[in-house]
Amino acid sequence: MNLIGNGMLALLGHPEQAARLTAQDTGPGLLTTAIEELLRYDSPVRDATFRCATKSIDLHGRNLPA
C-alpha cells in the first residue's frame, strides 16, 4: 500500500519519468523495471527497519554505545 503512495509521489515530482511510463510505445518491461526502481528509490520498508548496536563499538572515530 505504501509503495503505491510513495511511487505516485515520486512520479509527480518527476513528470518526465511519469510521461515515459504512460507513453503509447512503452512495453511491459519498462513498467516492471519502474516498479523495481521505485522500491529502491523510496522504499516503505526502510522506515520499518531498525538497527541497534548490541555492544559498544568504535566506528570511524566515534563511539556507538550498546
Image (spheres, rainbow, N blue to C red):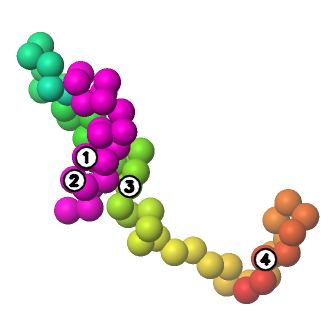
Q: Which residue is mark 2?
A: 4
SS at mark 4 in the image: strand
Q: Where, quadrant-wise, is the C terminus in this rendering? A: bottom right
Q: Which residue is mark 4?
A: 64
4 shown above or below 36: below
Binning the other alpha carbons within 10 Å of mark 3 as few (below 14), some (14 to 19) or many (20 upward) gives some
Quadrant housing residue 62: bottom right
Q: Which residue is mark 1?
A: 8
Between circles 2 and 1, the one closer to the viewer is: 1
Task: Pick whichever, 15 or 2, lies toward us.
Answer: 15
Give the residue type at disc 2: Ile
Binning the other alpha carbons within 10 Å of mark 1 as few (below 14), some (14 to 19) or many (20 upward) gives some
Give the residue type at disc 4: Leu
* Whether label 2 touches label 1, CB < 8 Å: yes
Between circles 1 and 4, the one closer to the viewer is: 1
Residue at far right of view: 61
Where residue 15 appears, as percent x and y from the top left, is 30, 30
